[in-house]
Amino acid sequence: MSDALLDMASAFRLPSERVWLNASHQGPLPQGAADAVQEMVRWKQQPHHMSTPEPFIEIPGRLRTVLADLLDAGIDEIALANSSSYGLHLVANGLGLKAGDEVIVAANDFPSDVLPWLRLKDHGVVVKQLDPQGEVLTVDEIAAEITPATRAVCLTWVHSFSGHVVDLDAMGELCRLSGALFVVNGAQGVGGIPIRPASRSIDVLVGVGFKYLCGPYGTGLLWLGPRAMDQVSSDKLYWLSALTADDLAQEELDLDQIEAPATAARHDVFGTANFFNFAALAASAGLVLDTGVDRIYAHNLALTEMLVEGIDPTRFELQHRGPVERQSSILFARPLKSSLEEVGARLVAAGIDVARRRGMVRLAPHFYNTAEDIDRALAVINRV
């Protein structure tokens, strides 16, 4: 792996005295996105920049286009969100689930994948929380529980607490044959691992903008496939998704004739001309797109392999990363000689930023990291 392949030094302004290995928590904002925020601040300070309809149309339109290109999807299939939870709640509430309907989730999944469905139990919906034998559910474990009453299977693509990657193709095909929607949370994968949901048996993909897309917090996306587009209803009619400034300029406006768009835009979060957040996300996601997710994935895996080969096995026990053909660049290491609290504190004090999850250190490099970063991190990790 050559660092020259992905030279991000000019794109990011990371402090030279620190090594950020925590993309699974937050991706740092690239300079181009920071510049976009500054331009939006100028707009707000000088509101005449917003006196025409273009910003309200152009910014969300630009973001929707970038996200669609990243997923190799149609623009009409993308809804703008503020989190992965937004899309998951929207789908859970929009399927019209009734008493006796079933939903399958993983009991050890991130809470955002489980909570939207649990609240439907009050309406008689059966939520099956399955305990996987390994870190993530297998297709056989799902097949043993899926029934004609199963309306949805909701799983994380890249498991937050292990880095293991779900077999999307096998799971999606099982759901397709059974008639259930396959709902996927891609928060830990979109921007770091290539995915083209339209070519997979996925019905819904949600994601966030602030991790591997390196955008601001409070940003996200929702992709709807054909089956989900038909089944997920909307309970709102947002005026900005159905009207323009030209409509408002008319002497009379017949609101009885206003209809929500037939596209995924009808599910957009309110405030789609979110200048501060969405202009920045369009810039950061554009950087990911221009760099190429395939290249980013190869780069990140190579950095993770450096960590695997370099970490002292007498000091840390590395968690198994799952099948080679479905590996993420997230690595978990359990301290053997010191407490997790001590290890975490020493790493941060030495300028190595990681996360602590379920008794282990989580390391998550991304495309702004270099081999030099990994060498510096290893020098510290193997001392703590």
Image (spheres, helix red, strand yellow):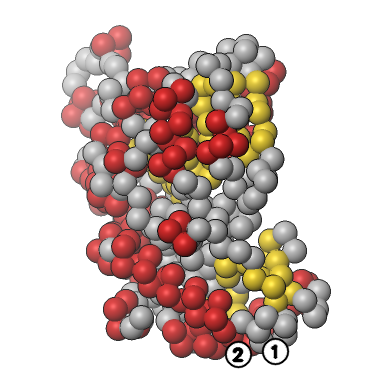
The number of numbered badges drawn on the structure is 2
Q: Which residue is label 1 attached to? A: 383
Q: In screen coordinates, is 118 left or right of 215?
A: right
Q: Quadrant of the N terminus?
A: bottom left
Say what amino acid the circle numbered 1 marks.
Answer: Arg
Front residue (pair 237, 302): 302
Residue 40 x %, y %: 34, 57
Tags 1 and 2 touching, CB below 8 Å: yes
User: What's the residue at 80%, 78% (across, down)?
Assistant: 338
Q: Which residue is label 2 attached to? A: 379
- Look at the picture and state if 353 lies above or below 203: below
User: What's the residue at 61%, 71% (across, down)?
Assistant: 354
Instruction: Assign a secondary structure to mark 2.
Output: helix
Say what amino acid the circle numbered 2 marks.
Answer: Ala
Callout 1 crowding tier (Cα within 10 Å): few <14, some 14–19, many ≥20: few
Residue 380 x %, y %: 64, 87
Q: In screen coordinates, is 262 left or right of 332?
A: left
